Amino acid sequence: MADFQTRDPLSPAFWDERFSRQFTPWDQGGVPRRMAQFVAGSPAPLRCLIPGCGSAYELALMLDHGWNATAIDFSPGAVAAAQAVLGERAGQVELADFFAWQPPAPLDLVYERAFLCAMPRAMWPQVAERWAQLLAPGAMLAGYFFFDDNPKGPPFGIAREQLLSLLTPHFDCLADESVDDSIPVFTGKEHWMVWRRRAS
Ligand SMILES: C[S@@+](CC[C@H](N)C(=O)[O-])C[C@H]1O[C@@H](n2cnc3c(N)ncnc32)[C@H](O)[C@@H]1O
């Protein structure tokens, strides 16, 4: 797809151009299996944020289970795609930058899928710091992490050691599982992980 006008994934225009041209190879078209199990198995409804939500299929599932969930994206094209998926619940999707958005109440969970890997690697420390700021001790970061060493992206894959060094200052790892329902761009390279915010 050499004829895209935008090259900077830090700009909303980059993602807008791809949504408007329906070039969304990261889009699973539904809720990944392990996340669906996580939502169904949650002992109580959670207050959740989905940063960089794209089409936000997971938001619909969370709302179906009574969760108080919000999905944000800084691309108007992504927000439009999510609002089309959400229908009359479109108000739970907000146009917002992850680094500026403020939760109206403390979060129980941040859901990660294809957001960290959408960011150039130089941004990762800021993403990890923001996760840690948004989550109080005991709250969780759960979702899918893409392990790869291809220098080109997005998606920008991470090395396991680098993910550990980003997260272990603030989080304990509770789950780390291989994934068997990945779409082609992530096949064999993503793990389902759950991290719990530590007090320190
Ligand atoms: C690769 S897509 C993944 C979308 C969705 N999470 C999914 O799994 O289909 C990355 C998304 O993150 C959004 N994004 C990137 N940087 C962002 C930021 N700083 N704040 C909010 N959204 C952002 C993009 O607009 C894009 O929709």
Image (cartoon, rainbow, N blue to C red):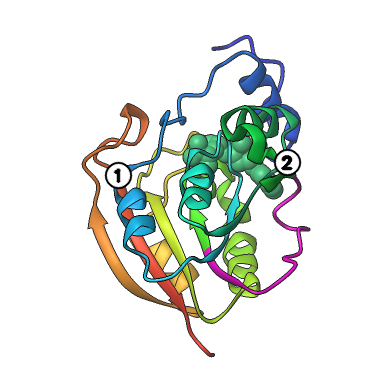
- Residue 88 visible here: yes
Left or right? Give the position of 89 relative to 181. Answer: right
Q: Nearer the viewer, mark 2 or mark 1?
A: 1
Residue pointed to by mark 1: 33
Location of the N terminus by quadrant is top right
Q: Three-letter amino acid code at disc 2? A: Phe
Q: Quadrant of residue 5?
A: top right
Task: Work out whether residue 9 can be spotted.
Answer: no
State the image quarter where residue 7 is shown. top right
Q: Quadrant of the C terminus?
A: bottom right
Q: Residues within 10 Å of mark 2 (few under 14, many from 20)?
A: many
Is 97 inside the magenta-drawn segment? yes
Q: Disc 2 to disc 1, how far (Cα)? A: 26 Å
Q: Which residue is mark 2?
A: 74
Percent position (x, y) of residue 16? 70, 25
| Image position of 58 with respect to 199: above or below | above
Query: Residue at left 54%, top 39%?
Result: 56
Residue in view at x 62 percent, y 13 percent: 21
Amino acid type for the residue under numbered disc 1? Arg
Q: Position of residue 42 (x, y in %)?
A: 37, 66
Q: Position of residue 26 (x, y in %)?
A: 46, 31
Per the picture, the main secondary structure of the magenta-coloured stretch is loop
The vertical placement of 82 against 48, above or below, is above
Q: Residue at x 49, y 53 (%)?
A: 112
Residue 45 falls within the magenta-colored stretch: no
Q: Tell whether 55 sits left or right of 187.
A: right
| Residue extent of the magenta highlight | 95-109
